[in-house]
Amino acid sequence: MDKLPRLRRKPKPPAIETSVDRANNNGGEGTRTTTTEMPSPKPPPSIIRNSPLRNLKLRVTTKRARPQSPAAHPASSPTVAVFSQSVPRPVMPAFLKMTQPEIENKFHELTWAERGRLALGARSDVPNNFRWAMFRQTDGGVGSQRGIMDRYINIKPWNHNRVRLKVAENEFDYVNASKITLDSVRDPSLPPLRYIAMQGPTTPSFAHVWRMIAEQTSSPAVIIQLTSMVEGGVVKCSQYFPDRHHHASSTSPSASCTPTAAAATTTTTTTTTTTTTTTTTMPNEPWYLNDENHWNDDWRAHLSYESCEELADGAIEKRKLLLHVHGEDEPRTIWHFLYTRWPDFGVPTLSDMESFFELMDLSREHGDPAQPRIIHCSAGVGRTGTFICLEHLMRELDAGATLGGHNPTTAAPPAAAAADDDVDLIFNTVDHLRQLRRSMVQSETQYKFLYQVMRSLWQAKHGLVALDGHAADGREPAPKRLEVADEFSSDDASSNDHEHL
């Protein structure tokens, strides 16, 4: 016990001492007692200084994203999603909460529906103008003379929706391209999104492609290319436009904004963290189109290269081309955007999504919403369909569509939104696209990608944490925990600690 002196109980002096003076002030009839309070000695130190309940601080927390460095954010107040107690939180639509097997089943439904269309179109007794019939280049003499127009024998446009060249009735009017028009589901006042989805041009189809662009668009026109010229050693798209060091006689399938020694180069680094622009200009030899007068109507044009810029750390190559159509006074401006971060049958990585969204913005800014944007990958269905579908869905969300949920500023979900709870907007959009051009959103991976992106965008719109525990912006979350103040620290120190969590 001598080794534990701290545990010995020490006698405590009385806290109050009382002295009694008996003064007989009224003849002994009464007794008056006087009490004097003595100062209390300082109590010995206690192991627990305060009541354990005094510093207990419970906070209602969710999984919290770890903040980025303050230097990475502007000095502004953060936006906080505030929900009234009388208004329920927005509810994610059912189709965005589907499991992976459920999404796979939806994709299989689309696949079987398309197989049914193909079977109907392949029948020998259907007319050429049948809805699911496809153009057949059957004349061997004409075919050998013109060359093969299709890059893949199994990817052709539906006959009812293919782009036809404006040529004489008996002339060859074919190009592997389809018209795509998407109206807003939630806001009919918005103009429709217009596209032309086409394959990566083959060398024999160059004149056909550029005539189609001249006939279907005006200046300025926008082309979005979602494939590199060569991927994995396989030619995915022929070089159908002139580049700084690429001439009409060249057969090289590559395109690049990388400046050469002969080029005059100007490099500009912008203030943004994601975009570095390299502009290169040089004299170039124009390409002459349809010198052979394929259609016997003297339509001719020539195409020249103006400049090239690398944007979004090289993910986007922006080219300015000039299309001089014979008989027109002024050349037409063609903006060509080549996106280099999207593998065939795959999807952009999470780190490339910012540049992918930038591509969408740039293509809209440089074009006219009243005319279609030309979009192609290699076959013109997988990456092309995914781009078109996602842009349409994003516009629906930006326009105020909650995609099945309700607006948190209203007391109850609108009738239209409530009716849409069971509607799978992604499935319906892909099905509609496949009725306009076969195999749009070609792979299951691309189809799942649409659900993944739209789920994240919906969460970000409503300021909610992602279902996987990540914040709406994709940052890694902190572990969920119960926050309890340190019993052995003062209130001020505890408060300061929590301010920096």
Image: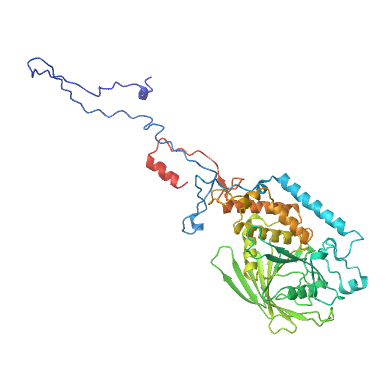
Left or right, 281 with reference to 153 = left
- Front residue of 7/74: it is 74
Whole-percent x, y for residue 146 in the image: 87, 74
Query: Is 223 above or below relative to 15?
Result: below
Location of the N terminus by quadrant is top left
Q: In the rendered image, which quarter is residue 360 located in?
A: bottom right
In this rendered view, identify the residue nearer to me: 279 or 444.
Answer: 444
Location of residue 340 (image quadrant): bottom right
| Tally of numbered discs | 0
Relative height, residue 332 to residue 36 (above, below): below
Instruction: Note whether residue 258 is visible.
Output: no
Q: Is residue 466 left or right of residue 133?
A: left
Applied colour scheme:
rainbow
Q: Residue at x 55, y 64 (%)?
A: 272
Give x and y (percent) for residue 96.
66, 49
Which residue is painted at 86% across and 59% down in the image? 121
Report if residue 328 is visible in the image: yes
Which residue extends farthest front?
Answer: 415
Give the side of residue 12 with respect to residue 441, left or right. Answer: left
Q: Relative to 380, is 38 above or below?
A: above
Between 346 and 246, the one lying in front of the other is 346
Question: In the image, is residue 376 above or below residue 54?
Answer: below
The picture places residue 479, in percent across and down from the top left corner, at 55, 42
Q: Residue furthest left?
A: 27
Residue 478: x, y in percent?
Answer: 54, 45
